[in-house]
Image (tube, helix red, strand yellow):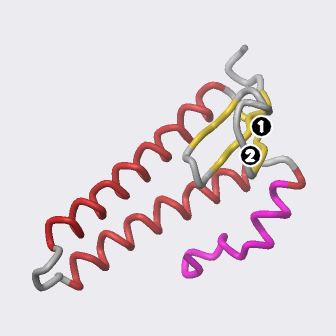
Amino acid sequence: MSVDERKKYYVSVQAGQILEDQGAASYELEILANNEEFNQLQVMFEDLSSMDNAITGHFNYEFGTHLSQTGDSRMNGGYDAILHDIYLFIHEHGTPSTQKHVESMGLLDPGRL
């Protein structure tokens, strides 16, 4: 595949997966991406997973003690920012039906997540 050649991928935001095979697992959205764009989305999913693990670890560590609302807000804000970037990327590279679906979710406005 050349640098500019785009291929259809099937994306599950919930599972953090980008699939080449439509039947490999359930997915919510379809995108057209080249190798570089595929890798960019993969990194965003990895960042989201890392943030999710950090939040989970924070809550497990803080369980039973006074929770820092400022720290929690920053972590949640970071998670939301990454998720917003993922949906922006998916909207930009999505098929027409994917673009309509993302628009209908109302997630393109940064304040909506």
Residue, x 55% and y 64% (percent of image)? 84
Does residue 108 appear to the left or right of 85 in the view shown? Answer: right
Residue at 72% across, 27% down: 20
Where is residue 112 drawn, in percent x and y?
A: 59, 80
Q: How far apart are labels 2 and 1 at the CA level?
A: 6 Å
- Residue at figure coordinates x 89%, y 55% from the top left: 97
Looking at the rendered structure, the kind of residue marked 2 is His
The residues colored magenta run 98-113
Instruction: Say whether residue 56 is left or right of residue 25.
Output: left
Image spot of residue 41 (x, y percent): 56, 41
Residue ID for mark 1:
32
- Which residue is at the front of the view, 23 or 48? 23
Query: Quadrant of residue 71 in the image?
Result: bottom left
Residue 82 on image: x %, y %: 47, 59
Q: Are marks 2 and 1 in contact (CB under 8 Å)?
A: yes
Comes first in the chain, label 2 or label 1 = 1
For residue 23, the mark is none
Identify the residue position indicated by label 2 in the image.
Answer: 93
Closer to the camera in the image, 8 or 68: 68
Q: Nearer the viewer, residue 77 or 62?
A: 62
**Is 42 on the left or on the right of 54, as rendered?**
right
Query: Which quadrant of the rendered structure holds the C terminus?
Result: bottom right
Tell me the chief SS of the magenta region.
helix
